[in-house]
Every structure is written in structure tokens, then in C-alpha cells.
Image (cartoon, rainbow, N blue to C red):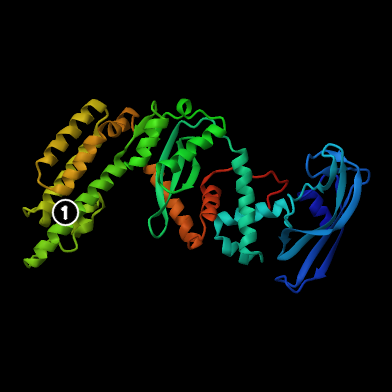
């Protein structure tokens, strides 16, 4: 079977013909070989203007250009074609023709871009470049081309629930704001922007407005943490949406307060020669059902002592009853009673949490009003995938690369149409 037959089957090009294929020696390639595919226009066909896309009469030809194609059996494949210049009447000037296998002046075919972008989801960009003998820049530009196409063609209708959170992407308190869609039929990254300020989150609503989406009418549920900048923007832009502060962030804040109490008391006991709280951090922070037999035995021994850490631990555990309620009214009563008890505990870190829960009481109860359908657990799961992407790449030097990588990995974007999937 000739290689031209395979090309016509998996990668046909309208108005063009694969003229000849020749095997040549190339010292720079992994196997020292290369396949060169010469292309010519089909007889009688007119070239398409690179500006407006309308057919026009030919003017002359340029020098041959080379386009990298998907390698076959470890052999580099190059398409060679002499571009025509078109005397376009619509544009009123001479334009270089538009070809169906490549975009603009890039020396790489669209099929190869999709091929590299698909592998870039599975491996780091450096590994993809090493595996297919291309530069990191070539992989980055291929992924960016696919992402740009996906962002231009994605469907933003039907978004009813979103989650907002931030993630640290570099040292020195450098954060990125992430907005996810939390609907059951579609969970994806909608927006990523540098910073975690009110201005950062406002760019998401501007993006929806440019896409013709009315956020007030579409979005009904919002999940976020207690970051003031986010609360301010959400209250302004989505006044009718149900803003939910769920269990995850409250439990995380409680654990930090408990650990603060434990660390302070452990230092005091160590000065007095007591080691009862030594190596007890995870005994107190983990859920009881996740502890081993020995760990539970040691935890019971700690709970026998009259310590501030023990009182803080019991207060933290008593709040678990809140999440068993279904009615927002009874849940609110339980929360109020818990806050009153904590305010009498003389444990300042725990009292600080109680004050915060009182200030955000209605947002917490919105979780019950939403019938526990939406929570930030999904958001934290997506954040874990974000951090995994950072670790896979061993970090990124620029935020542009971060933005492209996250949209590519988590955006669930549509990809350019190609006639055959090569991987």
C-alpha cells in the first residue's frame, strides 16, 4: 500500500492533491530518515484568499514552504507546498492563499498541533517535546492554538452553579483566581485570572457579558470561601443567587483554631516537663473513623485530662451535629447554640471562629436551603487537579503558560475538527 493512499484516507485535503512521497535522509531526525510529501493544487481549482476566504484568480507563486506533519513509525513527515498569491477582488489587493491543513504562517499542520496538544494533557510539555523531537515552544504554541479555538467556540449557556476559589501558583503569596462550573452535567474551569482581588473576580463577569450571558438570570448558586474580596463582588453581581459557605471551609477553619490551641498548650506543658500532647496533632485533627486502634487508645488517654486542647477538641466535634440537619431553621438554632457555648469557653482561637460563623450565618445556612446539592468539595477536588498540573510541569515561568495549561487540562474545551485521530 502506498503512503499516499493512507494520507488520502486519514488526512484528505480539498482542492489539493498529494503528488509524490519520497523517503530522504535527515541527520537531525531521530531515525536519520524523513518522509517528504509534495502537494499541488487540483487542476481547475482556484485558491482561497487568506484574508476574506473567497476564491480568486492566481497571481504568482512563492517559494516552497514546509509543514511538519504527524510522524509515522518514528519517521518525521513533512508536507511541501509552494503557496499561491491570489489577486483578490474583495480585499482589493494581492493576498497569500489559505490552505486547509495549516493556519497562518505556522510551519506545522493543524493535525500535528492537535496531536501534540493531546499528548500534552498526559505528559509535561518538556516530555512531549523530547518524545517527538520538537521544542518546548512548539508544544506550547500548539496547545495555545487548541485552547484559543476552544475558548472561541465553547458554549457558556446553561450555567446555574459556580464555585470560586484561589490557588497559589508561586512563592511570595502569588495567587490565581479560579471560577468553576459546578452543574452536574458539566464540571469544568470557566475562568482563570492572576490575583485574588475584587478586580480579578470582576473579569469573569465581564467575560460572561461579552459572551452575551446575563449572569444574574443564569447563575442561581455560588460556592466560595470567606475571602472578603469574593464576598463583596458576589453580593454585588449576583444578589439573587444563593451564596453557599459549606462544611469544608468551616471545618478547615476549626481545625486551624484547634491546632493553634494545641500548639500553644503543648509548648507550655513542655516547659513544665509534660509530654501528653507530644505528636498528637493528627490524632486531634483526623476523624475518629480514620484512626487506627492504637491511635484511638492514645486519643482516649488524652481526653481524660482537663486541658484547653481537650475542650477545643470537644467543641469542634460537637459542631458535627450541625451537618445532620435538613431544615435551615433547626440548623440555625444549632449553630447559634454552639456559638454561645464557644463564646463562654475562654479559648480565643475558637471564639474567633465563632464570631466569623455568626457574621456569615446566613451564607452557611444557604447550604441547607440548597438541599446540600452544591458544596466546595468539588472546587477543592478541581484545585487538587490544578496543583497536580503544576507538579507535573515542575512549575511555570509565566502566568500565560499557567492560563493555557489550566484551560487545556480542566476547561473541557471543544477541539478543532480533524479527519482522523492520531492518538
Q: Residues within 10 Å of mark 1 (few under 14, many from 20)?
A: many
Say which quarter of the image contains residue 141.
Answer: bottom right
Labels in figure, total: 1
Q: Which residue lies at the image location 50% right of the left edge and 28% below the top edge?
A: 214
88 in relation to 328, above or below: below
- Residue 224 located left or right of residue 126: left
Q: Is residue 60 left or right of residue 377?
A: right
- Residue 391 percent across, percent down from the top left: 46, 60
Residue closest to the eye, 214 or 263: 214
Residue 47 image offset from top left, x and y in percent? 86, 44
Q: Judge whether 220 appears above or below 18 on screen.
A: above
Task: Determine the residue positioned at 28% across, 47% down.
Answer: 252
Residue sitting nearer the eye, 63 or 159: 63
Give the position of the C terminus as an image quadrant: bottom right
Q: Is residue 338 visible?
A: yes
For mark 1, give the secondary structure: helix
Which residue is located at x 57 percent, y 64 percent?
Answer: 126
In the image as oriented, which residue stretches furthest toward the front? 92
Q: Position of residue 100 (x, y in %)?
A: 78, 46
**Quick one: which residue is furthest to the right in this view?**
44
In the depicted structure, whether residue 109 falls above or below residue 251:
below
- In the rendered image, which quarter is residue 20 located in? bottom right
Taking the view exactly as shown, the residue that stands out farthest to the bottom is 27
| Relative to 3, 360 lies left or right | left
* Residue 143: image location, x then y, percent: 61, 53
Q: Image quadrant for the N terminus?
A: bottom right
Residue 74, compared with residue 329, is above or below; it is below
Q: Residue at x 79, y 53 (%)?
A: 7
Residue with the mark numbered 1: 261
- Between 284 and 133, the residue placed more toward the observer is 133
Residue 423 visible in rendering? no
Amino acid at each position: 500500500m502506498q503512503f499516499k493512499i493512507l494520507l488520502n484516507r486519514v488526512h484528505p485535503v480539498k482542492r489539493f492533491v498529494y503528488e509524490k512521497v519520497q523517503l530522504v535522509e535527515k541527520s537531525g531526525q531521530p531515525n536519520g530518515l524523513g518522509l517528504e510529501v509534495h502537494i499541488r493544487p487540483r487542476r481547475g481549482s482556484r485558491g482561497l484568499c487568506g484574508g476574506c476566504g473567497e476564491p480568486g484568480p492566481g497571481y504568482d507563486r512563492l517559494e516552497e514552504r514546509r509543514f511538519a506533519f504527524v510522524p509515522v513509525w518514528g519517521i518525521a513527515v513533512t508536507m511541501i507546498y509552494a503557496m499561491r498569491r491570489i489577486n483578490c477582488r474583495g480585499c482589493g489587493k494581492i493576498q497569500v492563499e489559505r490552505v486547509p491543513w495549516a493556519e497562518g504562517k505556522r510551519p506545522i499542520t493543524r493535525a500535528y498541533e492537535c496531536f501534540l496538544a493531546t499528548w500534552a494533557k498526559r505528559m509535561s510539555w518538556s516530555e512531549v517535546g523530547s518524545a517527538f523531537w520538537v521544542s518546548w515552544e512548539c508544544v506550547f504554541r500548539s496547545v495555545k492554538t487548541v485552547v484559543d479555538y476552544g475558548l472561541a467556540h465553547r458554549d457558556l449557556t446553561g450555567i446555574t452553579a459556580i464555585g470560586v476559589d484561589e490557588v497559589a501558583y508561586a512563592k511570595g503569596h502569588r495567587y490565581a483566581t479560579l471560577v468553576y462550573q459546578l452543574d452536574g452535567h458539566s464540571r469544568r474551569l470557566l475562568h482563570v485570572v492572576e490575583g485574588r482581588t475584587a478586580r480579578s473576580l470582576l473579569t469573569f463577569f465581564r467575560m460572561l457579558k461579552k459572551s452575551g450571558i446575563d449572569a444574574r438570570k443564569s447563575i442561581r448558586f455560588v460556592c466560595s470561601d470567606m475571602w472578603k474580596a469574593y464576598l463583596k463582588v458576589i453580593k454585588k453581581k449576583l444578589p439573587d443567587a444563593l451564596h453557599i459557605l459549606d462544611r469544608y471551609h468551616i471545618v478547615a477553619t476549626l481545625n486551624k483554631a484547634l491546632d493553634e490551641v494545641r500548639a500553644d498548650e503543648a509548648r507550655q506543658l513542655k516547659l513544665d516537663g509534660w509530654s501528653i500532647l507530644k505528636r498528637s496533632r493528627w490524632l486531634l485533627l483526623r476523624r475518629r473513623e480514620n484512626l487506627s486502634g492504637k491511635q484511638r487508645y492514645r486519643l482516649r488517654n488524652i481526653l481524660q485530662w482537663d486541658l484547653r486542647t481537650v475542650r477545643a477538641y470537644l467543641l469542634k466535634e460537637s459542631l458535627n451535629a450541625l451537618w445532620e440537619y435538613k431544615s435551615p431553621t433547626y440548623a440555625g438554632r444549632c449553630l447559634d447554640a454552639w456559638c454561645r457555648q464557644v463564646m463562654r469557653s475562654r479559648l480565643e482561637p475558637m471564639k474567633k471562629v465563632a464570631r466569623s460563623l455568626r457574621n456569615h450565618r446566613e451564607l452557611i445556612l444557604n447550604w441547607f436551603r440548597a438541599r446540600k446539592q452544591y458544596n466546595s468539595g468539588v472546587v477543592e477536588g478541581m484545585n487538587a487537579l490544578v496543583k497536580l498540573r503544576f507538579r507535573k510541569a515542575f512549575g511555570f515561568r509565566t502566568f500565560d503558560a499557567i492560563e493555557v495549561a489550566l484551560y487545556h487540562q480542566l476547561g473541557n474545551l471543544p477541539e478543532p475538527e480533524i479527519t482522523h485521530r492520531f492518538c
